[in-house]
Image (spheres, coloured by chain):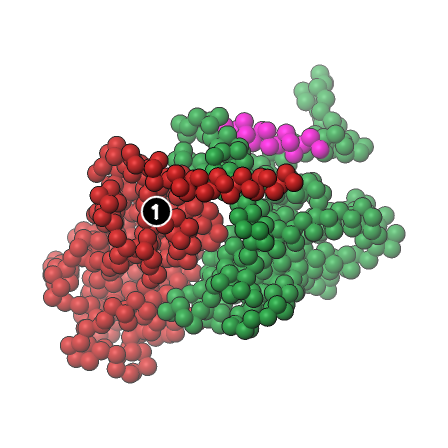
Chain colours: A green, B red
Amino acid sequence: MIVLDKRPQPSRMWSYAAPVLAVVLTMVVGGILFAALGKNPVEVIRTIFLDPLFSKNAWFYRPQLLIKGAPLVLIAVGLSFGFRAGIWNIGAEGQYIMGALCGAAVGLAFYPMESWLIFPLMIMAGAIGGALWGLIPGLLKVRFGTNEILVSLMLVYVAESLLAAMALGPLKNPEGMGFPGSRNLSQYPSAANLELISGSGMHWGVVAALIAVIFAYVLLARHMFGFQVRLAGQAPRAARFAGVNPARMILICMGLSGALAGLAGMFEVSGPAGQVTIDFNVGYGFTAIIVAFLGRLHPVGILLAGAVMALTYIGGGIAQSNLGLPAAAISLLQGMLLFFLLAVDVLTNYRVRFSNRVAA
Amino acid sequence: MKRRTLLASGVAAATLAMAGLPALAQDKTKVGFVYVGPVGDGGWTYEHDKGRQAVEAEFGDAVETVFVESVPEGPDAVRVMQQMALDGADLIFTTSFGYMDQTLEVAAKFPDVKFEHATGFKTADNVGIYSARFYEGRAVQGHIAGNLTKSNIIGYIGSFPIPEVVRGINAAYLAAKAVNPDVEFKIVWAYTWFDPAKEAEAANVLIEQGADVVLQHTDSTAPQAAAQAAGNVYTFGQASDMAEYGPMPRVSSIIDNWAPYYIARTKAVMDGTWESDSTWDGIGAGMVGIGEITDAVPADVKASAEALRDAIAAGEIHPFTGPVNKQDGSVWLADGETADDGTLLGMNFYVEGIEGDIPQ
């Protein structure tokens, strides 16, 4: 009989080992899945996890890791604050869209004027747009006690409809022959978020993601706010006695995660994506939730988790075209990652004991 | 330091890879396909993949085909196309309108690789475009629908309000109106190409509003299933035959047949005769097929629909022949005048008689 004993303290060792074990388990079970699909499991796993880094075309894939990973890390860092404090912003995807829309709208409003001021203004607009969208569920929770999980999630669908309306209406390219989609911002020098070093994949969004990681690390380790966030998550009652204002905490966490998601959207729309289109969002806001947990809600962990997740996307694409793997198998692999992490986390909080007695 | 050497070697490898490409790819012609949906969607992507399989069947060992499915229309598409080009593809078909700018971007980097973009309007020396005159098939559908409806309400599930879809609505309406002056169109925009849940919902809304014929410009079979559940509602297969829903509700279909074009273009690459082109073929050339009209349709209607199909194929009838007014009552086509391709390609207005506005 297997018995689970709750640990008095979460195991430190397991809290580091769990994500690694989850990745390994994902590879093993994924390998079995691929074998069932009639593929050589070792070859598939190698293609997904190693080819983007070490194959003959790795010079092309490595920069792609930055492009794919940066929005994930940026969003996940923002989410991690709320998640630590028990505030569940599930709607980063919507905040990502709103940031992109606001940023793009500012840029397009100036078209075709050229000025170095335009890009900084777009960055601000992106952050504000995302923050405001994130504050809606925050304010509703503080004022009316609504559930931020539901409200933030529902607002994703509102944002998607707004995105479609903008791509078909006010932001539509007047020279696009009636087709939906805005002008291409990456072809408008003052608004373009281009690679800082050609061929490196390094754009302003990557820089922002790295800054966010450092900033979050310092905030959590050295700053009063970081202490309050950790306290609110670990001991809500103690936090209240320590003078943590829950309403303020909710608003800051929702606003902060919204702002970072909005920034991610803005950097994406002005750089890699280039234009506002109906299908602009591709799920970064949701995938970032996996990244945040896989990274243990720790800034450095998130950086690594974002890299692993980006790897599965890029390697997944290679596996599809070179080995004929279906796209659904890749999505399954990514889902498994979170599934196993949550499962393995039992070991962090519980001690497994084998007992002869039948537990009641 | 390390990062810089890494980058430098990357650039060197890039130059090598690009220079080495044509030489490596001599023996087998490699053809890549980028799909927007899953190959099992039963509609749009499914038919493109049948075209790919036809290329393999035609040329056997002389070609190798690769594909990546469910590729979002953005930076991911750039990565996938570039990856295919790097892995030695000689010809790449990008099979969604939303890949337009991405196709041109990648094509500019790989002048020796040929690209074919479906349903777009931008070409380059190594980018050709192709599409099908689906509106010809829509006219046949409209003819059948106008005859079948008893409630005189025909439902239409639009995907996105782009010229391609608006053109289909207009063509179907004109043909329906010609045989049934009392006919009325109800249009629901699903804002998706493929989302079974949304499509089923749209179909149900239309059926509740009294539609007894539902046309769809989305790719899944969900509306067929919804109509089947409702009973006494007629539908048409979209992109693919969807014959499994015949003889009721599916009474006919528009079938995209890309195989002849894909085979011809692959052959041109093999022969070295490929040139950038702009192809827009219809029923006559076989790119648009009309699926079998089932016995649920009265024999005289079936006969007249087939006559219409054949007349369009022979070029005797143009679905857009005057007199036709625009929705606002202004004259679009004078008596006997036919629409020019330019207007059709950018069509962003309803013809007179259709109620409602195109979402802006």
Q: Indicate the quadrant containing the C terminus of chain B: top left, top right, bottom left or bottom right.
A: bottom left
Residue at (49% x, 33% y) in the render: A55
Q: Is residue B94 above or below residue B137?
A: above
The residue drawn where x is 71% and y is 27% is A4
Establish if B45 lies above or below A329.
below
Determine whether A175 is above or below B219 in the image. Answer: below
User: Residue A239 location, x and y as percent?
Assistant: 84, 50
In terms of depth relative to the viewer, which is nearer, A187 or A326?
A187
Split into 4 quadrants, where in the image is the N terminus of chain B?
top right
Residue name at image x 83 percent, y 48 percent:
A222
Q: Nearer the viewer, residue A323 or B225?
A: A323
Q: Residue B165: x and y, percent?
A: 33, 64
Categorize mark 1 by other alpha carbons within 10 Å: few (<14), some (14-19), many (20+). many
Badge 1 is on which residue?
B113
- Horizontal and vertical percent position of residue A37: 41, 30
Q: Quadrant of the rendered structure where residue A135 is?
A: bottom right
Q: Out of A199 and B303, give the one closest to the viewer.
A: A199
| Quarter of the rendering containing residue A24 | top right
Predominant secondary structure, magenta span: helix
The kind of residue tagged 1 is Val
A50 horizontally vs B70: left or right: right
Number of marks present in the image shown: 1
- Disc 1: which chain? B
- Residue at the bottom extreme of this rendering: B330
Q: Which residues are magenta?
A: A16-32
Instruction: Determine if residue A96 is in view.
Output: no
Whether residue B45 appears in magenta in the rendering, the answer is no
Residue in the picture at 33% in, 43% down: B90
Q: Is residue A25 magenta?
A: yes
User: What is the secondary structure assignment of the residue under circle 1?
Assistant: loop
Res B317 visible = yes
Q: Position of residue A241 (x, y in %)?
A: 88, 52
